[in-house]
Image: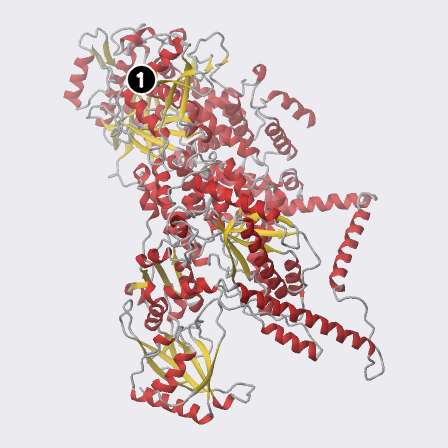
């Protein structure tokens, strides 16, 4: 039984799921907890706890309630969830990815701000992936440690902790209401939309301008060796080059057209080539047939 | 060689030029090959391998010209190898038996002449054998006598001795022809069944003798030759108890009779003669000629003649036998056989026809076939002859001036005095020609080799082949002449009644099983019954009013009235004409018009009530109405109103002037705008998706050059467009909505336009710069693989949303008007996918493509003219599609070989990139989308579901074959929940109740309120769950009307695993010896689902039996 309290360095905290009319059977969920030890610690690390396998309906409120009230150990400052994919398919992109190399500080700052401008969310509550992780940041280190301890104790004593008991009313409800709310949130207020768009576009032009300015400055500023980097024209040269190259190839193709039969050896080689192709095709066909026979058995009418 | 082929060009009949050229070319190919590689397939393989070392030129020749058909040829050779019976084995095994049999027959004692009834009584008394006298049986006052004496000749004839047969699942039949001596017959025996009565006694005597002979070990039965009740034959099957060698080699010996050629003069049995003069059951018939009777009689005399004739033909032409095998296979796959009831054109007739075509049949009596032809050429030329030459204007060989009935096919062989097609009825002939035509078209198609469709696929599946089928009561008479007379009457009446509504009326069925010698011959055809299969003409089948003759045409009007009875009405039409006419009901609730006509006319002329008839085909239309909001045709008002609303929106968008850019086009991009949506807005309270439309502006440099900024600009545009539309009055409400709002590289915003009619459109802006930007990001070398994956996803989403959907919509719209039944068939197919809970995994477009393929590439059948044929063939296609190995290619009109090669290349590329089929399982391409993964990429469906889809289709086809005509259509649409691990029952009432919930608008009446956009709750919930439990379970659900979500666990997660951070599912510790092992916490997951669903979920059933296989 002792084994059950810990796994791979994580404490196990069993939690009862409340029974619902649709699924009356009792179910126990297991949370795995540990002090947060990331590879690159930051200032908040000492007071953070790492939780694995949070239930799918977990919210910050749930965890606050769990540690604050149910275990009555520590005050939670905030919770960082692993981003949940809102798309069905795993290949769906998760976030904006505009990670072009920026060198200028001011423009980058503006860019960061720009990235912060988001269209309003259309869901009132995010769901977590099954088995997902979360980082709970406590008010201070002692409350984190106390919480961890309390959790171990609760697991040892087999204290009955019911998930989300008492916080149900404080959360946006799930089920039908969630989808009805979503249906309303999908159509944000016109004014809000326009404001977001305006903010974004204003900032976007600011970024562009800042960038331009910086470039212009850079073009005049000698670097430490005393050289001035000479740049010319807009940045979309890459695309233009592509088009140009394509055109050139096209032109060359046209030029060489009609000259394939010029020498005798050309036509001879061509004929040979054709023969070889036919032979290859024939061999391919034979292989195809053998393959077909292997798959479908003999070739016979149904 | 060239002169050679030039000569041939003149000789062979050209039904159409292209096919002709093909034949010539094939011919060349065979010639230049310098040998007969094709002809002797048995020795073909070793020959090739032998040559390979020193000389590949032969192969080259074979491969040149038609490299496509070289594959055809390889398959053909395989097929022939497979089908050629091993005659030496058979002969060596049967030799002894046949010899014994011959000895037995030869030693039978003669039986003295007696009157028919007396002889019959005696035979029954002494041997217990009932003489199989054909109807009408000899009367008491018959003056002629019957007797038996030793046959003048006994010979093995037919396909075994000629070696023209093909292997089949049926036992090998050996024909033993017993020639009756001339002494038994009198000069006038050809009249009034006298010959057939004598023959029946002869057969009975033989049967008696064989049964009593010792050591033969046969089961003796009577059967009918070619279903012809005039000619009973003896069937000998080795006894089962005899467990020596016969069991392994299934065969039966059929004893047929023959007479000397000279016994009755040919002139007596010419088709126009009447040989049933008196005492016939039908008094009126006595004046008419009796072609079938005559030909049957004559065919007895030609047994040996034809045997010799075919033998010679086979000796003269090496590939003759192979061509016979091909012909037999082709006929068998189409359900054609020698029996009168299965077309009257079988392997034997094929063989004779080919032999005759060596002598003539072409223009100016030139031969159609040459002995230098290969088997394939013989086969194809014979088919071309069948397809091209209309034999209802008789073709005579070595004869002139033979009168025939009008409308009856005739191929008269003057030397042997027989119309080879004497058993072929007008409807069978129409059927045969149609099949031949279709096959010739298939063989001429340059795109596909169609080998499977010509030889492999079983074409004779009535439910797939015909649009409507009627089962008639079995005729109550055993006389073949009477039966045919009945069928002809039915055919004539139906042909007249249906007119141009039906392209083909085919009557088939009615098999007489062999019966034991003690019993009386079967009085009835087997209860399988007689069927009428109809191929409908799409344009005419649903016409509600038939115009008859004008009132002034007294005679015609009278005959019209007498034919139609009280249904005929005199009406005045809009153009002022007064005509006899028929008016049928075409309301949705009434049965189809074809059914009304059939039911009416069959009752009127044959007194068949509706209980007598079983009518198959309408139930599929009905099913669609039930499942699809009572809408059937693409031209129904529901679809029409959406199209009209779209047109008005399009107009006002073109005219709007408050937007700084000019509009290039507004394209429809939604199932409801291409007539393929199963459920329609405005018909029921169930939620429906708004109709997607795509707006594209003229290109402008004012767009920002950044993906997210483009999305923001789109939002601004949408707001502006909404304002414009609202002020122009075309829309009652416009709302800008968001999607994928957290992902800047996907489309973020759309505009929901509620048209004045209440129909909702969802407008998205297509900006082609996005594609370039995405492609550039994809090429960016610095990007991480994950980023690239996301960009690739965005790019495919872009292409799907803005390029392929509008394109597909346009293409299907066009096709729907060309094939009126395409739209209903697609919708029924969608219903099927919904019913089997596949809606979440199979995109609608994929289903549409499948059905389109059935319509545009219908071979080996014709384009379906009914929902039944279209739908069942879609299932047939699905069941046969080996999706792991084959790409599905759909033709929208311009699929050519080049496109097919391009598609094949892409398919191979996908399979080599992703051999485990993790993102692409199905590959469906078309000429408008050669990429092939637009609708199937990113696990749409995952391979497990693809496999399930095929399994379901296979099960449906199996059901279809097992149940046949008794198939209950609801079985096809019923899905079992048993195979799933758990089932989430949703609260159906709640869904429906809230589906009407939406913002109320004062200016809309009640009907329109129900039409405001409704959340797709089932879909959203399933999507949420799938997102949470991504790899761990598969969820199955139907459309919004469906009240269950069924789930399967991923079996891989059942195994306890050691704990790591990467386990992406809810786990619980395992109490095992090994430390740190965890397994899936299924209980908790299900409890979680119940919480996530909250009031949506009514209950969760767990199928423990399956779930507990840990």
Front-most of B35 and B955? B955
Q: Is B754 left or right of B603, judged from the image as shown? A: right
Farthest residue to the bottom: give it.
A142
Picture coordinates of residue B845 (x, y %)? Answer: 49, 50
Q: Disc 1 designates what residue?
A: B565
Of all chains, the one bearing label 1 is B
Element carrying mark 1: helix
Q: Nearer the viewer, residue B651 or B826?
A: B651
Residue name at image x 66 percent, y 55 percent: B660
Residue B653 in sight = yes
Q: Residue at x 14, y 20 (%)?
A: B125
- Measuring from the top left, give residue B86's x and y in whole percent: 43, 37
| Depth order, front residue of B590/B191 | B590
Is B845 on the left or on the right of B160, as rendered? right
Given residues B58 and B15, the one toward you in this image is B15
Q: Based on the displayed image, in which of its 4 quarters is residue B992 positioned?
A: bottom left
Can you say which quadrant of the picture contains the C terminus of chain B?
bottom left
B276 is higher (above) or lower (below) than B809: above
The structure residue drawn at horizontal position 67% and vertical position 63%, both measured from the top left corner, is: B704
Q: Is residue B1073 above or below residue B185?
A: below
Image position of B515 with respect to B697: above or below? above
Q: Is residue B152 visible?
A: no
Q: Position of residue B296 (x, y in %)?
A: 35, 16
Looking at the picture, does residue B16 appear above or below residue A30?
A: above
Residue B486 located left or right of residue B689: left
Picture coordinates of residue B68, whole percent (x, y): 60, 41
Neighbor class of circle 1 (other Cα within 10 Å; few <14, some 14-19, many 20+) is: some
Query: What's the coloring here?
Result: secondary structure
Q: Residue at x 32, y 64 (%)?
A: B1097
């Amino acid at each position: 039984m002792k084994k059950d309290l810990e796994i791979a360095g994580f404490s196990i905290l069993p939690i009862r799921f409340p029974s619902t009319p649709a699924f009356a059977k009792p179910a126990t969920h297991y949370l795995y907890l540990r002090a947060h030890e990331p590879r690159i610690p930051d200032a908040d690390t000492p007071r953070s706890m790492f939780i694995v396998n949070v239930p799918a309906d977990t919210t910050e409120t749930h965890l606050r309630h769990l540690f604050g009230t149910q275990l009555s150990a520590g005050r939670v400052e905030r919770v960082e969830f692993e981003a949940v994919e809102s798309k069905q398919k795993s290949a769906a992109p998760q976030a904006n990815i505009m990670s072009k190399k920026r060198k200028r500080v001011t423009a980058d700052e503006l860019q960061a701000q720009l990235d912060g401008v988001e269209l309003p969310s259309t869901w009132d509550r995010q769901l977590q992936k099954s088995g997902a992780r979360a980082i709970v940041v406590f008010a201070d280190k002692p409350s984190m440690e106390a919480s961890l301890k309390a959790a171990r104790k609760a697991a040892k004593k087999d204290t009955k902790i019911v998930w989300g008991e008492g916080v149900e009313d404080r959360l946006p409800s799930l089920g039908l209401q969630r989808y009805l709310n979503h249906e309303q949130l999908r159509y944000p207020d016109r004014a809000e939309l326009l404001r977001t768009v305006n903010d974004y576009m204003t900032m976007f032009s600011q970024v562009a301008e800042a960038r331009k300015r910086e470039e212009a400055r850079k073009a005049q500023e000698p670097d430490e060796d005393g050289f001035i980097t000479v740049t010319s024209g807009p940045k979309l040269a890459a695309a233009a080059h592509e088009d140009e190259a394509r055109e050139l190839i096209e032109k060359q193709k046209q030029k060489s057209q009609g000259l394939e039969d010029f020498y005798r050896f050309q036509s001879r080689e061509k004929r040979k080539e054709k023969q070889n192709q036919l032979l290859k095709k024939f061999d391919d066909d034979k292989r195809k047939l053998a393959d077909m026979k292997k798959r479908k058995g003999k070739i016979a009418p149904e | 060689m060239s002169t050679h082929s030039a000569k041939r060009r003149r000789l062979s009949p050209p039904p159409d030029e292209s096919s002709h050229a093909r034949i010539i070319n094939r011919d060349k190919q065979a010639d230049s090959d310098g040998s007969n590689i094709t002809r002797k397939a048995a020795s073909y393989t070793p020959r090739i391998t032998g040559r390979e070392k020193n000389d590949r030129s032969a192969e080259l020749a074979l491969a040149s010209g038609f490299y496509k058909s070289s594959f055809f040829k390889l398959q053909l050779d395989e097929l022939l190898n497979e089908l050629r019976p091993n005659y030496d084995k058979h002969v060596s095994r049967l030799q002894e038996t046949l010899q014994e049999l011959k000895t037995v027959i030869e030693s039978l004692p003669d039986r003295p002449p007696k009157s028919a009834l007396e002889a019959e009584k005696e035979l029954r008394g002494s041997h217990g054998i009932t003489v199989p006298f054909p109807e009408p049986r000899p009367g008491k006052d018959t003056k002629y006598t019957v007797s038996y004496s030793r046959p003048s000749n006994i010979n093995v004839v037919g396909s075994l001795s000629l070696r023209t047969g093909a292997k089949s699942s049926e036992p090998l039949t050996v024909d033993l022809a017993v020639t009756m001596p001339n002494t038994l017959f009198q000069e006038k025996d050809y009249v009034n069944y006298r010959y057939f009565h004598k023959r029946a006694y002869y057969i009975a005597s033989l049967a008696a003798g064989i049964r009593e002979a010792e050591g033969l070990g046969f089961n003796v039965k009577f059967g009918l030759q070619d279903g012809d009740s005039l000619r009973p034959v003896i069937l000998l099957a080795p006894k089962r108890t005899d467990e020596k060698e016969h069991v392994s080699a299934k065969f039966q010996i059929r004893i047929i009779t023959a007479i000397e050629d000279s016994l009755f003069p040919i002139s007596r049995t010419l088709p126009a003669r009447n040989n049933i003069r008196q005492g016939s059951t039908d008094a009126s018939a006595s004046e008419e000629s009796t072609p079938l009777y005559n030909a049957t009689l004559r065919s007895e005399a030609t047994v040996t003649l034809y045997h010799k004739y075919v033998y010679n033909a086979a000796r003269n032409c090496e590939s003759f036998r192979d061509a016979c095998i091909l012909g037999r296979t082709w006929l068998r796959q189409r359900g054609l056989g020698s029996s009168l009831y299965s077309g009257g054109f079988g392997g034997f007739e094929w063989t004779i026809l080919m032999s005759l075509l060596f002598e003539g049949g072409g223009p100016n009596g030139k031969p159609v076939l040459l002995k230098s032809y290969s088997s394939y050429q013989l086969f194809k030329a014979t088919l071309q002859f069948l397809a091209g030459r209309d034999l209802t204007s008789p073709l005579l060989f070595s004869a002139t001036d033979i009168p025939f009935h009008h409308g009856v096919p005739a191929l008269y062989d003057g030397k042997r005095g027989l119309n080879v097609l004497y058993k072929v009825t007008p409807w069978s002939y129409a059927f045969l020609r149609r099949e031949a035509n279709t096959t010739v078209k298939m063989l001429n198609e340059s795109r596909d080799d169609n080998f499977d469709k010509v030889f492999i696929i079983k074409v004779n599946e009535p439910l797939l082949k015909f649009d409507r089928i009627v089962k008639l009561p079995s005729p109550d008479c055993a006389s073949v002449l009477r039966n045919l007379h009945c069928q002809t009457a039915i055919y004539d009446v139906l042909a007249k009644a249906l007119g141009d509504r039906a392209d083909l009326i085919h009557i088939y069925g009615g098999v007489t099983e062999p019966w034991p010698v003690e019993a009386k011959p079967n009085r009835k055809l087997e209860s399988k019954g007689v069927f009428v299969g109809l191929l409908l003409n799409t344009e005419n089948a649903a016409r509600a009013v038939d115009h008859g003759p004008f009132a002034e045409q007294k005679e015609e009007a009278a005959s019209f009235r007498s034919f139609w009875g009280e249904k005929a009405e005199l009406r005045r039409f809009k153009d002022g004409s007064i005509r006899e006419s028929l008016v049928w009901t075409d309301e949705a609730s009434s049965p189809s018009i074809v059914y009304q006509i059939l039911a009416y006319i069959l009752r009127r002329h044959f007194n068949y009530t509706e209980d007598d008839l079983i009518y198959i085909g309408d139930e599929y239309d009905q099913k669609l109405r039930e499942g699809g909001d009572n809408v059937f045709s693409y031209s129904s008002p529901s679809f029409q109103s959406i199209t009209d609303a779209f047109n008005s929106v399009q107009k006002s968008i073109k005219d709007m002037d408050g937007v700084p850019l000019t509009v290039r086009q507004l394209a429809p991009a939604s199932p409801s705008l291409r007539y393929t949506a199963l459920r329609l807005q405005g018909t029921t309270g169930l939620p429906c998706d708004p109709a997607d439309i795509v707006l594209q502006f003229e290109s402008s440099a004012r767009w920002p050059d950044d993906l997210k900024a483009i999305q923001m600009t789109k939002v601004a545009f949408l707001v502006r467009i909404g304002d414009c539309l609202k002020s122009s009055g075309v829309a009652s409400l416009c709302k800008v909505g968001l999607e994928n709002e957290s992902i800047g590289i996907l489309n973020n915003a759309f505009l929901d336009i509620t048209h004045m009619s209440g129909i909702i459109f969802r407008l998205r802006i297509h900006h082609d710069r996005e594609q370039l930007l995405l492609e550039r990001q994809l090429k960016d070398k610095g990007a991480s693989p994950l980023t690239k994956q996301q960009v690739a996803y965005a790019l495919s989403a872009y292409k799907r949303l803005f390029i392929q959907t509008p394109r597909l919509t346009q293409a299907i719209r066009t096709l729907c008007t060309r094939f009126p039944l395409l739209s209903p068939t697609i919708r029924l197919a969608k219903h099927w996918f919904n019913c089997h809970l596949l809606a979440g995994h199979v995109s609608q477009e994929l289903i549409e493509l499948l059905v389109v393929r059935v319509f545009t590439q219908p071979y080996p059948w014709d384009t379906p003219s009914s929902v039944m044929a279209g739908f069942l063939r879609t299932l047939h296609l699905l069941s046969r599609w080996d999706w792991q190995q084959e790409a599905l290619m759909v033709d929208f009109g311009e699929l050519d070989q080049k496109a097919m090669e391009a598609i094949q290349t892409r398919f191979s590329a996908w399979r080599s990139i992703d051999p485990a089929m993790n993102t692409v399982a199905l590959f469906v391409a078309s000429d408008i989308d050669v990429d092939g993964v637009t609708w199937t990429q990113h696990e749409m469906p995952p391979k497990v579901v693809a496999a399930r889809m095929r399994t379901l289709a296979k099960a449906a086809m199996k059901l279809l074959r097992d149940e046949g005509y008794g198939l209950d259509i609801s079985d096809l649409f019923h899905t079992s929940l048993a195979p799933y691990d758990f089932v989430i029952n949703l609260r159906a009432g709640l869904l429906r109740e809230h589906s009407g919930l939406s913002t109320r608008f004062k200016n809309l009446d009640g009907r329109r309120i129900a039409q405001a956009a409704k959340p797709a709750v089932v879909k959203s919930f399933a999507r949420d769950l799938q997102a949470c439990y991504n790899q761990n379970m598969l969820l199955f659900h139907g459309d919004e009307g469906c009240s269950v979500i069924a789930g399967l666990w991923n079996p891989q997660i059942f195994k306890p695993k050691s704990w790591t951070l990467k386990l992406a599912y809810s786990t619980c510790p395992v109490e095992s010896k090994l430390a740190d092992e965890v397994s899936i916490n299924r209980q908790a997951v299900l409890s979680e689902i119940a919480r996530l669903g909250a009031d949506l979920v009514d209950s969760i059933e767990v199928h423990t039996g399956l779930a507990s296989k840990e």
